[in-house]
Amino acid sequence: MALFAVLTTQAPKGISADEFKRRLPEGFSHHVSLVDKGIVKHSWIRVGESGGLNIYDVSSHEELVSALYDNPLSPHIEFTVFPIVDAGSFDVEAFAESAG
């Protein structure tokens, strides 16, 4: 499995802010289904921002793209994706050897 941190930011292009707000329950329902399936491991709202930070645990980049873009609000959300690694799986000795 691969972990990704995904920053989401509301970007309601092509629809009004009111329409975006009206459709939020659809997007939230999609998000909850990802949580229920274990795809979204952690989810936080970014205080003072119009978006969130979510940790996805997926088997492939394709699964991540599907999880993000199957959301009915995805055309109106900007995603910033960071691959992350669990600190416990980091091989310190191999890194030290490669650093010389």
Image (tube, rainbow, N blue to C red):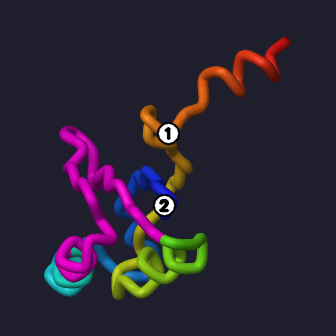
Q: Is residue 49 left or right of residue 83?
A: left
Q: Nearer the viewer, residue 15 or 87?
A: 87
- Provide the residue span drawn in magenta: 32-58
Give the quarter of the image for residue 77.
Answer: bottom left
- Locate residue 53 relative to residue 64 in the image: left or right: left
Give the left or right position of residue 2, taking residue 50 as reference.
right
Q: Position of residue 12 (x, y in %)?
A: 38, 71
Q: 75 or 70: which is nearer to us?
A: 70
Residue at image x 49%, y 83%? 66
Q: Amino acid at mark 2?
A: Phe
Residue 75 at least partly seen: no
Q: Is residue 53 left or right of residue 75?
A: left
Q: Amino acid at mark 1?
A: Ser
Residue 43 in the magenta stretch? The answer is yes
Residue 61 appearing in the image? yes
Secondary element at tag 2: strand
Task: Say which quarter of the image contains residue 67.
Answer: bottom left
Q: Which mark is residue 79?
A: 2
Residue contact between numbered discs 1 and 2, judged by CB atoms under 8 Å = no
Q: Which residue, given by chain and number where applicable, does mark 1 sit on?
A: 89
* Residue positioned 14% across, 81% down in the render: 25
- Category of crowding for the residue at label 1, using alpha-carbon neighbours closer than 10 angstroms: few (below 14), some (14–19), many (at least 20): few
The image shows a total of numbered marks equal to 2
